[in-house]
Structures are given as C-alpha cells and as structure tokens.
Image (cartoon, rainbow, N blue to C red):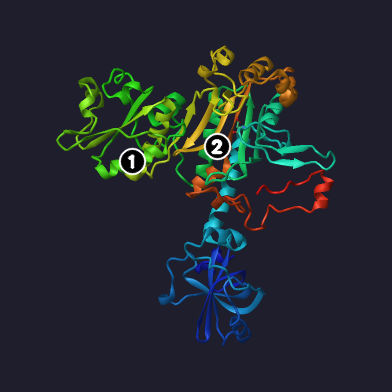
C-alpha cells in the first residue's frame, strides 16, 4: 500500500493502486502523488525509463485512478520530504495504467472552506479527504471498542425491529404505510426501549445493540433524523451497576484511540444541584463560575424587582465589566427571557457602581460582596426563568472570557431528575425521560399524590456540556406503571390501547431492570473534535430534512400511493 513503504523497501518492486492527489510536470519528468487509504506515495515517471507510461502520464488529472508497477528508490537528499512518512523514497514507474478517469472536480480535496452543501452533494469525493477518512475510521474503531467492552462485560447483541408501534421518546414518529393493510402505519422505532424491556422479561439479562433510531425532529448540529445509540439494558442492576458499564465503555473508547481516558468514577451531581449552581442539566464543568442563590436575603428588599420575584440568583464574574459589556449582556439575557439585567460592578478599590446599590440593605450588600475588579449579575424571576437566563449567561461568559479550560475532558453524571414536568400546552404532567422510568426509592407514593415533587431514577451522562445519553432504572411492576400513566392524565383505555401488551408483560414475572442509551454519533463527533455529527456521518441529511446526495425525500407516483391507500392533499398555500 502507498503509505506502508519505507526506505527499508528500497530496491523492491511494487504494484500500487490509488487516486492521483497531485501531478507535477517537470518538463520530461512527471511526478504524481498517489493516494490510497494508507497514505501518499510519490511516483516518478521518467520518459527514458518508461516511454509509454510517460506518454500516458500527460493525460493524468487529479483524482484519476491509476495502477502502477515500478521500483522503490531512495530520493536524492535534497528532495527528501521529512513531513511525509514516505518522504525518503519514491517509486520509479515502469508500467502505468489509467484505470479510471475523473471529470473536472467541483472542488479540490485539500481546499479549505469548501461550502458544506457542495461537500455533501459530492460526498463520494469529500469522503476521500483526510478529514472524512480520519473521522469515519475513528468512528469504526470506537464502535469496535464498544462492542469488545460490552461483550467482556457479559452483554449479548440482540436485534430489535425498526418497524414498530410508536415509542414515546418525546419526538414525532416517522410513519411507514403498510401495503398489506392499507390505512395502517408502522412507526420507525425512536429507540428499542420497550423491546429491550421485553428482553429482560424474556430472560436475557444483559442486552446491548448498536441501534439505529429514528426521530422526526428539527435537525441541528447534534441531531439527525436517524442516528445510532449504544443501547443497553440489564436485569437486577443497581443504578451504580449501570453507570459502571458506561464508564468502562467510555474508558475503552479512549484507550482504543490511544488517548488518556478520563478518571473513574465520574463525578455524580444531582439535578437539583446542577440547576442551582449551573442553571443547566448538562453543565459544562470545565470552568467554575457558579450561580449563587439570594432569594432569602432579598425577601424584604427595597429593590422591588428582587422582593417580588420567586427566585433571585446571581453570578460573580471575575472581571470589571464596562457599560458597553453590560449593555451587550443585557441584550443577551433578554433573548433568554430576562426582563432586564441588574448588576453591581466592583472597581479596583472595591467601590461599587450600580444603579441599584442604593436600594440594597447592608445584609444584601454583604451577601453579594465580591472581590475588587469583578461584576455581580442578577436574575430575578420564576425559578425556571432564572435558571435559564443565568445558565445561558454562565456558558456565554465562560466562552467569551476564556474561562473554559479546553485541555480538560470532564465527564460527569446527573442523577435524581424529577419524574414529571408540566406540559405547557396541555397543562398535564408529562415524563421528563420516558414513562417507563422508575421513581426514586421512597418517592413511589408521590407519583399520584404529588407528581411535582417525585424524583426519578433517571440519569444522564455529560461530556464537556454535551449530553451523551440517558437511562434509568425502570418501573417493573404493572400497577406502578399504570399509576404513572394515570398521573400523566391517561385513561385506562388509552394506556391499554398504547401499551396494553407491555403492561401484560410486566404481569408475567418481570425482573427489576434498568439501562441506558449512549448517542454514538455525538460521542464519536466529540472524540473526533468535530463541531457537529454530520462530520462523522457518511451520508447525513441537511437542516431542511433532505439528503443532498440522492435528493431524497421525493414525491411518489400516484399508482404507488394508491396501492398504499394514500392520497396526498394539496400543499396548503
Ligand atoms: N430509550 C432511552 C433513550 O433513547 C434510553 C434509555 O432509557 O435506556 O433515550
């Protein structure tokens, strides 16, 4: 292979095949950089040594496919290229064949800043680039490390269907019409959730799968319609058992890439603590900048905004911010729903500058006291609003002020999520994770009595502020599962229509069980240092929801639709 030859091979005959990366004509001698998946090799076509090859070499253009035979020779000292692993040698060509030609290229493979839509339209070319070769190969190494780790830990790979009944993971389903039963539809699995739970009831106590999942959601940097998860489930686990499986998988993945793995055990943080201190359930812990609470201190405040707010919290920014900075931050905070941004600026001598200082009492000022050269920023509102605004400000400032330590890899767990959240549209309780998540021990009674306070056994894995995946210890009793459905406002009929088969399964000897799903594409993107999952996906879709390569999705002939019993309505104008 091109990238394998070294100076120890000098004198050997070699046959190489690959793509032309570059061709240089030096009046007589033609130099070609030939590329295959292992690297580059310089070819020299000398008209005196190989006249026929030299004649043909005139036709060579970038990305032609060649097959050549020749001899490995040492380069003269002044032409050695120390930057190339094969830079000490070259191949003196004896025979050359143009195996395949290329039309003029829409972009060059080593070109910087090629428009992404062009790259995706000509993905077969783009895939030859160093970046895509590296990313997809890295992804493959990670998948195989994960499989090894899972199998070492006693898990077996079981395939579950893609065509199924709707699974509630909080997104819309992709529907697939069924020709044999016109008018009915499969949903593409949003995850194998209920199947893996059924496997537990079926006596497979350690299941895993690299599962494809489909969710009809708006596409983003970390989201595609279809994506892969390391999906797993185990019987009789403690929460710690599940977390340990995942930590081992993460460590194995780092090791497979020859990287220093993060230290185990990963820190565990409660959801309540994360929301209070970081205003986020996926905090980036590569920098401090913690949020502090001032609700108690400001109860009787003369500053009306504080006194009347359900929650008052603040951040101490280690900079003396200017009026201009503060104005920009206020605009930012308003985009996140704040009404304004109160602040106290501490000058170099500790003097306070602020329009609100005069309204604050001694105890208040004492509570907010910050070192000289810093700024205190407040949010006062409903608790959720305060968390949202300060969480966003914290992240923004962390990045803007360079507080994020980019050299650190911080993995951590968020535990003890609430079981339910209020759905603003329906004003009903809905699940935070999914309705099969068990309540925290001691919280079972609250499921129906006080859903707002019930905590769950749901956990998330976070890496540098990205959510890598979620899981939970499940409900394994049919009566408790029914309680959850009732708390969500579902009638018995509704619950039976949607999940009757599963409730029945839970009544026939269901072991306690729990599991997790790790978003594989996100994990690989982060490992590859890529900003979005399209860069680690061979053929991704773009934000409009189409595939730039094939042009899908497409309209379907009326006859095909008729067979499926489907008529397409006119597009609304
Ligand atoms: N099915 C869940 C998900 O896709 C993961 C789990 O609870 O195991 O997020």
Local secondary structure at mark 2: helix
* Label ID, residue 402: none
Q: Earlier in the sequence, mark 2 or mark 1?
A: 2
Residue 562, given in percent of the width and then of the height, sits at 83, 47
> Left or right of 323: which side holds 69?
right
Q: Secondary structure at mark 1?
A: helix
Does residue 257 appear in the picture of this structure?
no
- Percent position (x, y) of residue 222? 53, 44
Residue 543 drawn at (x, y percent)? 57, 50
Please give the name of the residue rendered at 27% of the width and 45% of the height, measured from the top-left corner.
324
Disc sitting over residue 249 in the figure? 2
Instruction: Let me know if residue 75 appears in the view.
Output: yes
Vertical comparison of 8 with 287: above or below: below
Q: Residue at x 63, y 29 (%)?
A: 233
Q: Residues within 10 Å of mark 2 (few under 14, many from 20)?
A: many
Residue receiving disc 1: 329
Query: In the image, residue 202 lies at what x, y percent?
Result: 73, 25
Dot 1 surroundings within 10 Å: few (below 14), some, or many (20 or more)? some
């Amino acid at each position: 292979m091109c990238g394998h030859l070294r100076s120890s091979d000098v004198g050997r005959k070699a046959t190489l095949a690959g793509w032309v990366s570059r061709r240089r004509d030096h009046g007589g001698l033609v130099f070609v950089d030939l590329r295959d998946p292992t690297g580059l090799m310089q070819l020299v076509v000398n008209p005196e040594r190989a006249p026929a090859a030299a004649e043909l070499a005139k036709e060579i253009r970038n990305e032609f496919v060649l097959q050549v035979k020749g001899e490995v020779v040492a380069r003269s000292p002044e032409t050695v290229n120390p930057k190339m692993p094969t830079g000490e040698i070259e191949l003196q060509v004896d025979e050359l064949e143009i195996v395949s030609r290329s039309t003029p290229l829409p972009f060059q493979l080593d070109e910087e800043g090629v428009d992404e839509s062009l790259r995706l339209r000509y993905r077969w070319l783009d895939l030859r680039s160093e970046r895509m070769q590296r990313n997809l190969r890295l992804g493959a190494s990670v998948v195989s490390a994960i499989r090894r780790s899972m199998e070492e830990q006693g898990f077996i790979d079981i395939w579950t269907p893609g065509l199924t009944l709707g699974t509630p993971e909080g997104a819309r389903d992709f529907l697939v019409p069924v020709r044999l039963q016109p008018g009915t539809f499969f949903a593409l699995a949003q995850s194998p959730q209920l199947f893996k739970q059924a496997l537990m009831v079926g006596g497979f106590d350690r299941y895993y799968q690299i599962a494809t999942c489909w969710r009809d959601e708006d596409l983003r940097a970390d989201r595609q319609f279809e994506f892969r998860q390391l999906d797993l489930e185990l019987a009789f686990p403690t929460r710690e058992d599940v977390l340990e499986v995942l930590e081992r998988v993460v460590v194995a993945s780092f090791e497979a890439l020859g990287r220093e793995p993060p230290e185990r055990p990963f820190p565990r943080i409660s959801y309540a603590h994360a929301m209070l201190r970081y205003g986020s359930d996926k905090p980036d812990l590569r920098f401090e900048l913690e949020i502090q609470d001032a609700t108690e201190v400001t109860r009787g405040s003369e500053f009306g905004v504080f006194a009347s707010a359900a929650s008052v919290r603040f951040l101490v920014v280690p900079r003396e911010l200017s009026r201009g900075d503060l104005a920009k931050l206020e605009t930012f905070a308003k985009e996140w729903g704040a009404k304004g941004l109160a602040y106290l600026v501490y000058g170099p001598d500790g003097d306070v500058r602020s329009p609100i200082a005069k309204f604050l009492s001694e105890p208040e000022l004492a509570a907010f006291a910050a070192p000289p050269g810093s700024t205190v920023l407040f949010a006062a509102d409903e608790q959720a609003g305060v968390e949202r605004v300060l969480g966003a400000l914290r992240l923004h400032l962390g990045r803007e002020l360079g507080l994020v330590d980019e050299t650190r890899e911080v993995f951590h767990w968020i535990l003890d999520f609430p079981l339910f959240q209020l759905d603003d549209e329906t004003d009903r309780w809905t699940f935070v994770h999914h309705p099969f998540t068990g309540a925290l021990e001691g919280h079972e009674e609250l499921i129906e009595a006080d859903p707002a306070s019930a905590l769950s056994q749901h956990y998330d894995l976070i890496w540098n502020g990205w959510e890598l995946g979620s899981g939970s210890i499940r409900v394994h009793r049919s009566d408790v599962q029914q309680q959850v459905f009732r708390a969500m406002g579902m009638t018995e009929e509704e619950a039976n229509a949607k999940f009757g088969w599963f409730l029945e399964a839970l009544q026939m000897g269901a072991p306690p069980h729990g599991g997790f799903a790790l978003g594989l594409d996100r994990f690989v993107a982060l490992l590859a240092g890529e900003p979005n999952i399209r860069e680690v996906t061979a053929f991704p879709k773009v934000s409009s929801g189409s595939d730039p390569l094939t042009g899908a999705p497409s309209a379907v002939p009326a006859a095909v639709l008729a067979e499926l019993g489907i008529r397409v309505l006119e597009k609304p104008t």
